[in-house]
Image: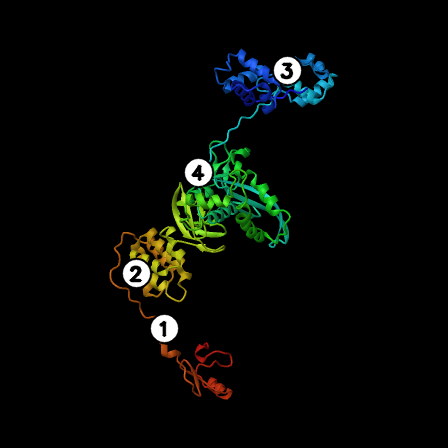
Amino acid sequence: MAYREIAMWEILEVLRRVGRGEGQRAVARVTGHSRSTIRRWVACATELGWAAAVVEPDEALAQRVAVRMRPVPAQRSPGESEALLAPHREQIRTWLAAEGSERGLRLSKVHELLTRQGVRVPYSSLHRFAVAHCGFHKARRVTVRRAEVAPGELAEVDFGRLGLVHDPATGKRRALHALIITLVHSRHQYVHVCHTQTLADFLEGFEDAFAFFDGVPARVVIDNLKAAVTKAERYDPIFQRTFAEYAQYRGFVIDSAVPRHPTGKPVVERQVQYVREGFFRGEAWIDRDHVQRDVVRWCKETAGQRIHGTTRKPPMQIFQAVEKKALTPLSRPRFDPPVWKQCQVHPDHHIQFQKALYSAPTQHVGKRVWVRGDTKLVRFYVDGTCVKTHERVEEGKRSTDYADYPSERAPYAMRDPEALIAVAKRRSEAVGRFTEQLLAGTFPWAKLRQAQKLIRLCERYGPERVDAACRRALVFDVINVKRVEQMVLDGLDGDDTAEPVQGELIPFPSRYLRDAEHFTHTKEETKTHGSQPIAQDASEASETLRDAPDTAGPRHLREEDEAP
């Protein structure tokens, strides 16, 4: 017959009734215990010093009686399996024990080794024997229930796969993932669905969730997502740079869960299955946007209105009553996620960032700098200091600040003739006038290199020599830098110690220079070429040739040229 455990309060009730003077039959009828059992309990209590008429029985007395009356288990004889395993006790203990840095064998391996030796017992019998006689047991994990968090203090985040949904962009079915953010105090949650698990999707989900809650919690526990956690570590994790900046922007503390430790975020851990089975599966979805619209409604009307198994209240009710007002209000605009990238400053003073070019100061040419770009600005950082800021430009465009160039190269890069003329005037007055004439015209940019060469001649040979050569070139209207350089070189071949020529250069009239009126032709019957008339018909031409005094004779010699 099986033994039934007698509770302490049953013995106490019997002792109280007997102490009040009730008969054993009446006590047996009320409590349901036999009179023999009642007599044994009263006798045991009397042996323990209880006086029924004097002392009121208490719980301690009843507990002592229960212990005394509990039957002792009988010694059982070992079974067949235990008898087979007993001679191998020490060997089993040795196989299971750990030696030094090596751990012991698994019990399944011990079972296999015993079978090879001819000891054939069920695995369950071996397990009972190892636990009872060989010190084998799995250590029970001692857990404690953590204290409840304050309203608005904590949110837990988890990513999980929902299933396949049609993607209009590719025309194929793609996997759809769910980013679930749950407020721990109220268990109210928001679900953001996306096709990828990139940082952009992560931040977009956070922004939508905070707008849904209309506030930000003080601390956020995240899974070790690669887009947000650069190095997953138990005590000192390293977070992704943009996500860390986002946490500072919104004012919450990042708390990364321990790697491969699901109890680090127990509230949200089972929500992926809840969303997948309770919302996603069994429905006909058009695309990702369709899922997103319906899941927001589902979070409010279904998940938010259910009776939660832990709080025994609807999460939406607790959120509206307590937690919403404890969140940090959204006082700043939507976060503009930046992109960080390490880039090289090329010799042309520009950095290529996301298929666009941005100029950098000349002292950083050749360096690798950190570039931070968002939708509005692009910033360059050297050793943590911002050294340049540009407005964002489209792909294929360029943003150039000419102040970043060296001062002597900036005018040419800017295609600014006036800047080069100003530099030339600072060298000398004649060099300035020469440069003005050189860069005059509709397209002065074609001669910018010549103007730069002229300025370099002043630096190489001195402004005095170049000034003298420019004066001479201006007099003769020779606007050519190469001729000016030749003049300077010719002057260096002479006596450098001679005094410079004073006065003004005046050009002499050319010997064979004709006046401008000579080239003015009038329409007359007889056209002239020089001082000789030109006939209009052949007869006049032949007559004129015959009458000419210098016409050659038959031997094509003039008379004065013939020999005497």
Q: Nearer the viewer, mark 1 or mark 2?
A: 2
Where is mark 4, residue-wise? 150
Q: Are marks 3 and 2 in contact (CB under 8 Å)?
A: no
Query: Which kind of residue does numbered mark 3 sit on?
Result: Pro
Left or right: where 388 falls relative to 235: left
Picture quadrant of residue 197? top right
Residue 410 picture location, percent across and down:
38, 54
Report crowding for label 1: few under 14, some 14 to 19, many 20 or more residues within 10 A (C-alpha).
Answer: few
* Element marked by disc 3: loop
Sequence-wise, the earlier of marks 4 and 1 is 4
Query: Which kind of residue does numbered mark 1 sit on?
Result: Leu
Quadrant where the C terminus sits is bottom left
Where is mark 1, residue-wise? 513
Q: Are marks 1 and 2 in contact (CB under 8 Å)?
A: no
Q: Nearer the viewer, mark 4 or mark 2?
A: 4
Q: Are marks 4 and 3 in contact (CB under 8 Å)?
A: no
Placement of 234 over or under 432, stated as above or below: above
Query: Which kind of residue does numbered mark 4 sit on?
Result: Ala
Q: Nearer the viewer, mark 1 or mark 3?
A: 3
Q: CA distance from mark 1 to mark 3?
A: 144 Å
Q: CA distance from mark 4 to mark 2?
A: 83 Å
Picture quadrant of residue 28? top right
Where is mark 2, residue-wise? 430
Residue at 49%, 19% (x, y): give it: 58
Q: CA distance from mark 4 to mark 3?
A: 50 Å
Q: Nearer the viewer, mark 4 or mark 3?
A: 3
Residue 282 picture location, percent across and down:
64, 48
